[in-house]
Structure formats: structure tokens, C-alpha cells
Amino acid sequence: MRMSIEPQVYIGFPDVKLIKSIAEAMRGIVDEFLINVSQNKISITALDPAKVALIKIDLPSDIFLDLKVERELGIGVSIESLENVLEGVKKTDKISLGSDGEFVEFIVEGLPSRRFKFRNIEIPTSEIPELDLDFDVSAIVLSDPFKIAVKDIAAIGNYIRFICRSDEAIELVEDDTRKGLARLQRETGSLIDIKFKNPAESSYDVSYLEKILKITSIASQVSINFGNNIPLKLDFSLVVGGGAEFYLAPRA
């Protein structure tokens, strides 16, 4: 199926799972996101409406089935529009995206093939902060134990406290009742590596973490970075290549 526009950029996604996993991780956190397309990579950036959470995803150009760039372009898309595109998509379908700067067009090739066309949303990059943080704790953990701990704490409260007192373990606990304690530790293998500068603890909205951790379906490890009452940073190494960063402001 040909596009109805003359695209200045054209992206053929490697599989449905990649774009669906990214959409699921952003759903409920942000309303819209910015795709910056260049010859070398595709960068996705999104800031939540309350400006407490920031998502950055970098995907190298060589993972895509097709990437044509007439000129570098910023493409603004709403989560609602992307969900309309992905509704009913099968894993055997092929998805491509093109933009001429004014419109964004998705093609889903399957049975049946479908076309979706939206106006390009202007997303001001001046609102997206540049963060340079000095973390007291930086740890690499297995994604599954971390995801289970977050899910368990989300079931009993609204905030999760990260605590680290040594280079042996990170504790996660529901902030108000201090129940639901989980430990990511060297002894069990859930803590792979850690850089420990100082004892640190800080509390964050667990609902944001529960949503962003859906991206672990395409990431095997997570890097947890935090300090005393500063934003949390999660780094995800994606199995297809590239990575994702998630920043979350601490509880006021």
C-alpha cells in the first residue's frame, strides 16, 4: 500500500512488538510524544502533563527494515492516535510510518491493510528539560524481580521508597506503611552490579513505575539510579539495540 503523502522521512519498523511495547509503556504517563528522525537514529521523547516524568528512547538506524530521510524531521504524535493504529494489529503485520512535516501517516500491512493519517503535532522542545544528576546509587538489576516488587507495592499503596545503605542490596518498600518490603540483592542474583557512593533513600509515585516497566518486555536488565530526594532514573537496554531512559521526580 502506497502512502498518500510524499514523505520526507519513512520508517519501516522491524516488528510489531517493538512499537507496541513502547506504546504500552507510555500509555497512561504521557498524552503525546516527539519522534526525531535522522540518518543515524530515531529518538522518541515524551514529557507527562504534570511534568514529573520524562521518557527518552534512542533506536539506532540499523534495526529498522527501512529508513529513508530526505531531511531531519520532528514528528509529533498523540498516544490516542497511536493506539488507534495498533488496535487489532497482529504480530505478523508490518507497520511503517511516513511524514512530510505537515501530516503523519501510518501504514499497517496485513489482512486487511489499513492507512491512518494525522496532522503532525507541534511539540515545543523548550519544555523538555536537560537533566544532569549526581546519583548516590547506580545499580543494574534483573528486570523481572524488580517488576514483581513494584507490582506488589502498587497493590498496597501509592508510593514506593527506594533505600540503599550498602553495596549489597536495594530495598523497596511502600512509603506510608513501610509494608511490602522487597530486596534486590547480590546474594539472590537479582542485583547484578552496583556503584555505591553514599547511603540514599527517596520516594516516588509507584503508578508511573508500574506503567513504564511494561517496556521490560523488550529489555532484559534495568539500571536504577537515585539519591536523596532527587529524581529517579531508570535505564533500559533494549534487546533490539539502543536504550530507553525514564526520569521520575521524587515525592514532594
Image (cartoon, helix red, strand yellow):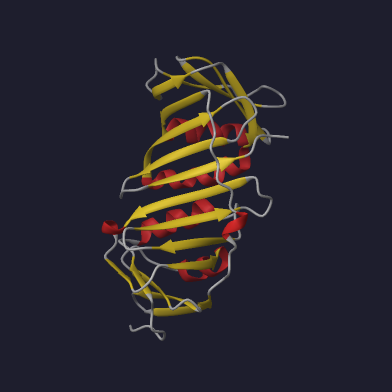
Please give the name of the residue rendered at 48% of the width and 50% of the height, measured from the top-left corner.
56
Q: How many marks?
A: 0
Please give the name of the residue rendered at 68% of the width and 33% of the height, measured from the top-left corner.
157
Towards the viewer: 100 or 211: 100
Q: Is residue 131 left or right of residue 38?
A: right
Please give the name of the residue rendered at 52% of the width and 70% of the height, measured from the top-left corner.
84
Q: Is residue 108 left or right of residue 247?
A: left
Please give the name of the residue rendered at 57% of the width and 59% of the height, measured from the top-left corner.
125
Q: Residue furthest bottom?
A: 4
Spot occupied by residue 223 in the image (x, y as percentages of width and height): 44, 33
Spot occupied by residue 228 in the image (x, y as percentages of width and height): 62, 24
Q: Is residue 12 left or right of residue 153?
A: left
Q: Is residue 176 visible?
A: yes
Spot occupied by residue 244 in the image (x, y as percentages of width and height): 43, 46
Residue 144 picture quarter: top left
60 lies above or below 152? below
For the C terminus, the image quarter is top right
11 lies above or below 190? below
Spot occupied by residue 205 in the image (x, y as percentages of width and height): 65, 38
For the N terminus, the image quarter is bottom left
Q: Is residue 155 visible?
A: no
